[in-house]
Amino acid sequence: MENVTITDFAAEGKCIVKTDERVIFVPFVVPGDVVDLQIKKKKHSYAEAEAIRIVKNSDIRIEPRCRHFGICGGCKWQNVPYEEQIKFKQRQVFDQLSRIGKVELPEFDTILGSKNVYEYRNKLEFGCSNKRWLTASELKEDKVYDDRRAIGFHITGAFDKVYPIEECCLMDNLQNQIRNEIHDYATANDIAFFDIREHAGMLRNIMIRNSNTGEWMVLVQFQLDTDEDKQKAHGLLQHLHEKFPQITSLLYVDNHKVNDTFGDLPVEVFYGKDHIMEKMEDLQFKVGPKSFYQTNTDQAYQLYSVARKFAGLTGNELVYDLYTGTGTIANFVAHSARKVIGIEYVPEAIEDAKVNSEVNKIDNTLFYAGDMKDILTDDFIAEHGRPDVIITDPPRAGMHPDVIQTILRTAPRRIVYVSCNPATQARDLADLDVWYKVARVQPVDMFPHTPHVENVVLLEKREEKKITTEDSND
């Protein structure tokens, strides 16, 4: 297809072209671009295509900052001005809540954009592979790549391939120096990079975190089969300790699993502490290697401030904080509530939440670890009291139906629903709509240059149950 005009943004960071026959999804283009397309996949109602040539640039197209843009796939919209990105995200939230939720909606608050659009992340993870991914242009070159060791991001659709990253501009530049130094040291010292198909090799994965208190955490995952492997691993870690005094928490994991998850594995401290500290207002938060903490620290403060405002606390309320993580929201609102009870699936995160209360001298919080649908039961409510306010911040999949039914039976006056996936949030709002109306909606952008957006919804209890089609058929 030639001389096709890209018409609009679409989900997952792609853009669209509409024809008489189908909708065509195209990545790494901008509305207004005129392009030549090559169809990659065709279905009855839609197709996926690649722009093989830009005939004319859109008036809003800008030059992406990252040298890996269009290959790594982490940032979809670096070629789009930030003000255009957040306009679409606002529209995306409205479309999903109205189309999927089909509930009555108030006028939305204007999306809160990120103060920093680069170097805003406090965490990045990199895969290590002995089979680096080669780009289409590299494959066309008359060149043999004998050394394909790489540290970078996994390529979508190629689980065993990693694209080497030399510079990522989404986090402070020190992470680039640390990652590249690990690559150079491992290459020079004959440390085998992991082969995921053969399940062999020593260097598997790297996680780098930093905090707004100036602390840095580096965790390296190894597969250590021999004493020589352990000596090499310690040599690498010692080198990092000497090269980067900024690292206050240097950790490692010996992982022999088929994947790089380490939630069920012990983490060893090579140097420093087993955590770093984040600060928010006058509070401090302990963040360990297994802890969830919002990845954009500055925007996390904006997000939690909205949640606290929507909760409308006066100091007399019992608050349930569902999916509490390390207790950030629970501790953030505790001074404004009578009591806060937090529930979270990850036991280590709950331990951090308790520590965070102790560190901040907060004595009106309780935390429980376990599956939400198993913990939040009628018996639990009977034991701890009926909440006045529920704050819920579930994972992308949204809330389990059992949890929603328990919330409805619990009947708090207000529900503050924080979501990283407005589509599943919309589905849950439809289930809550029988007793709760949407009073306010505040989108918050946490991840510039990506299609992801957070959204906070305030639900207020109806005086009477809403009559549904199901009720009228009874």
Image: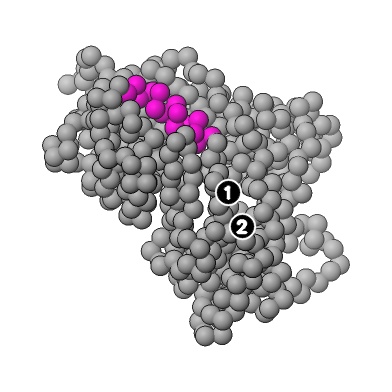
Q: Is residue 306 magenta?
A: yes
**Residue picked out by circle 1:** 214
Residue at 67%, 30% in the rendered image: 82
Q: Is residue 169 magenta?
A: no
Residue at 26%, 47% in the rendered image: 368
- Residue 105, x across and y down, in percent: 42, 17
147 and 217: which is toward the camera: 217
403 and 247: which is toward the camera: 247
Up the image or down, 114 lies above or below 133; here it is: above
- Residue 236, x across and y down, in percent: 61, 73
Residue 357 quadrant: top left
**Residue picked out by circle 2:** 246
Highlighted range, magenta: 299-313
What amino acid is labelled 2 in the image?
A: Gln
Q: Quadrant of the C terminus?
A: top left
Q: How many C-alpha atoms fall within 10 Å of the one at disc 2: few (<14), some, or many (≥20)? A: some
**Residue 198 in sight in this render:** no
